[in-house]
Amino acid sequence: MRLNSRPQDKCPACQANTHQLISLPAYPVTEFYEPWTQDFSPSGFFDQTLRFCDECSHLFLGTVLDAKFIYSNYLTTSASSAGALVCLDNLQAFIQKNLVNFDRFSTIIDIGGNDSSLLSRYANLGKKLINVDPNATGPDYIEHMNVFFEDMELSQFRTIRNKVVFCSHTLEHVEDPAKFINEISKSLNDEDVLFMQFPSLESLTRYMRFDQVCHQHINYFSLSSISRLLEKMGLVIEQHEFDEEHFGTLRLMARRQSAGRLSGIQPPAIERHSVLSAYERFRAFYAALNQAIHPLFERDGAGFGAGLMVPTLAYHLSVIGQLSYIYDDNKAKHNNRFVNLKARILPPDPSVYKKPMMVTSISTKSAARAIYRKLANEGAEYIVMPIICS
């Protein structure tokens, strides 16, 4: 597999000089599958780093892979991910709690709306619905703008008054978040409201979930770094919350900065050493776990769950690379494998539950727990949940 890549050392959020914090040599790409054959030549590995900005507490990838190629081959949809749907439920509840007089808004724009799962929830309110996404799909009553985020020009929406803008789990994918936020800012009027959610550095560090680091998630914003970036672009955070259901989400509501409207938050800085310390504890945990479970899985064990983040988990838990089979309910994945893992993806049958089973799709709490419940209900005799906090 060949992908164009470029290095970055300036902070994407504030353009400050940064430090390389963590080296990830030969790091696997995720969500690239190929038909299973007896012969296997693993591919899809790139040297990667994590860099940290002391100025604004922002973590980001030091090597950025070709986004247009990645999202031209993007398979994930919101409707197919239980974790993503739970996260949309929670975002919708956050919107309902914080948006007073929703009836006065005429238009809803979802930037990064994917298959329109979020917009479809507002179908019966008589509002104009617009999905801006390189892979925008969904019902005909929703207007679809198929455009890459790097090519996005949103100032045209400034003429639409009284609108709500959603941006759910999109910011982490964007190569130039400052340009992206600036485009959103240019689209907003004083009465408009912006809701965003994305994986947070606070959760990544607190719960030591570095297995969630992947080539698609370029940015790991903290409350500090996103607050500074929004304010630089003339926006202020009015409400925010953390949610651990899906990639450790930070969720916020923001508006244009105007007279008398100031941010009510003073985010604490995150120190470089605390991120590095969390990563070292994470590595120690998986080294010990790998040693403990290797004898159980080296001959007859199997995985359950071929979610997109399995290769990054396998990077830290090498016993996964020795598995011959990963079982999954998704028919589209059957008789395939990840380009960087030999395991054949198969549908489950009753006989597999006699084997030691590892939950291999753990990128979100809801997904990991759902698979564990399924295995327990089906009578699996041995279940390993390889996760620090779930």
Image (spheres, rainbow, N blue to C red):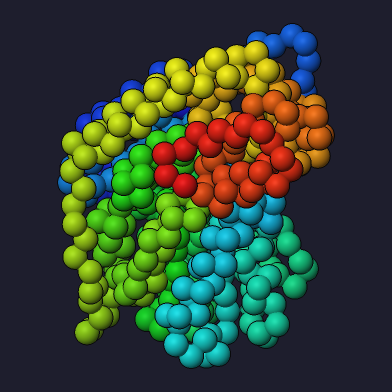
Q: Position of residue 328 (x, y in %)?
A: 72, 37
Choose between 171 and 296: the one closer to the eye. Answer: 296
Choose between 170 and 222: the one closer to the eye. Answer: 222
The N terminus sits in image quarter: top right
Choose between 163 and 169: the one closer to the eye. Answer: 169
Whether residue 29 is visible here, answered yes or no, is no
At 70% from the left and 47% from the top, the residue drawn is 377
At 66% from the left and 63% from the top, the residue drawn is 117
At 66% from the left and 33% from the top, the residue drawn is 381
Q: Is residue 38 shown above or below 243?
A: above
Q: Is residue 344 shown above or below 179?
A: above
Horizontally, residue 126 falls left or right of residue 319, namely right
Q: Position of residue 213 (x, y in %)?
A: 44, 36
Q: Is residue 278 shown above or below 27?
A: below
Horizontally, residue 244 falls left or right of residue 238, namely right
Horizontally, residue 202 falls left or right of residue 344, namely left
Horizontally, residue 90 falls left or right of residue 240, namely right
Q: Position of residue 335 (x, y in %)?
A: 80, 27
Whether residue 130 is visible here, answered yes or no, is yes
